[in-house]
Amino acid sequence: MTDRIAGEGAASKRRLFKILGPGLITGASDDDPSGIATYSQVGAQFGFAMSWTMLFTFPLMAAVQEIGARIGRCTGRGIAGNIRRHYSPWLLHGVVALVLVANTKNLGADLGAIADALRLLVGGPRLVYVVAFGALCAGLEIFMQYRRYTNSLFLAVLAGGGGRPHRSALEAADPGAAAGIRVDTYLGMFLSNAVGWFILVTVAATLRAHGITDIASSAQAAEALRPIGGLLTFALFALGIIGTGMLAVPVLAGSAAYALGEALNWTFGLARRPAEAKAFYGTIAATTAIGVDLNFTPIDPIKALFWAAVINGVVAVPVMVVTMLMARQARVMGRFSVPLPLAIVGWVATAVMAAVVAAMVLTAFGNRG
């Protein structure tokens, strides 16, 4: 009996690991250095008062992520591929341009934060670290075997599939496929929000409690923890910045390449060899190189992290609107349109995001006036 129970437990774990994938990786890469800086600033400025927001954002994030995963699973295309097929070219070009700008800016800011964290740990030249990490991330993404790379760095891209339709697979596996997507998505979003909550609470309990209320970057948060939390706490925080940054940089470069590849109907996909998808892998290399180059400009790295987060927030609104429109359209989803309750939560998330961006813009103009 004991052996049978143990065997069933092992089988359940194997099934779980087979299900986990893009949702888990998206959640993990969401807590990149710019996210860490944001959580740190909230914890330092507001203390524990804003910790409830993680409970609010979790269902909204999970709903949007599940809808995007369902679209990818059903159509075999990402957002750009479906826009190219079902909507006007101007919408396609606008969305892809926004994604490229946002991802490149965020990638450059994350590389700078990784370099800052390593310099805090071991000293040395920041810009050399930026170049080294950029080359490492791009090289692994381009030349390492796809499956091995995903296992080692947990890379996931937006609704991949290389353009091959998956509707027949969904028909054969539904509702099992939908259930697997939900488990993967909800676990990834839960971990993302849990990590954010712990960063916020840690900073509130340490830095704010000692009168430090202004944290403008993830590296600054790590450095401020050294005299308060001790060397080990400081080192763990800094290493976390490096780890999440190395996870986020390939995801940002890869998703930008997927979006452009789908928009221009290239041969693309990380499952292909570089010789088979030269333009796709060239986009990964070029995006990473531009991100590296941004660190050689006079742009303040702290402001770069801030504006990367701002641009991502602004870009998210039109992308979310298009995603929600696709999710309930039969011409896109066939008979696998997302359930109405899930669509309602997705629209609520979209409305909240739009309201936050509008409030940010109004506040900025108000302060300027």
Image (cartoon, grey):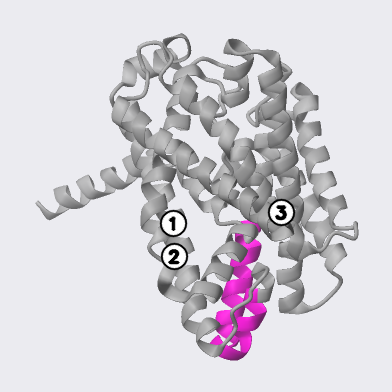
Q: Is residue 211 visible?
A: yes
Residue 189 percent coordinates (x, y): 43, 49
Give the structural element (helix, strand or loop) at label 3.
helix
- Report the side of 228 relative to 6 (left or right): right
* Mark toward the start of the polypeptide (3 vs 1): 1
Q: Badges 2 and 3: C-beta atoms under 8 Å apart?
A: no
Report the residue that reaches farthest toward the right.
297
Do the CB atoms of the residues marked 1 and 2 lie less than 8 Å apart? yes
Q: Which residue is mark 2?
A: 197
Q: Residue at x 68, y 35 (%)?
A: 99
**As drawn, 324 above or below 192:** above
* Label 1, label 2: how far apart the Cα atoms are: 6 Å
Q: Earlier in the sequence, mark 2 or mark 3?
A: 2
Q: Nearer the viewer, residue 101 or 151?
A: 101
Whole-number angstrom distance, CA of label 2 to CA of label 3: 22 Å
Q: Residue at x 54, y 89 (%)?
A: 210
Judge the density around disc 1: few (<14), some (14-19), many (≥20) Cα neighbours within 10 Å. many
Please, what is the three-letter code of the amino acid marked with disc 3? Trp
Residue 149 position (above or below residue 272): below
- Tell me where residue 78 appears, x and y as whole percent: 57, 25
Mark 2 packing: few (<14 Cα in 10 Å), some, or many (20+)? many
125 vs 97: above or below = below
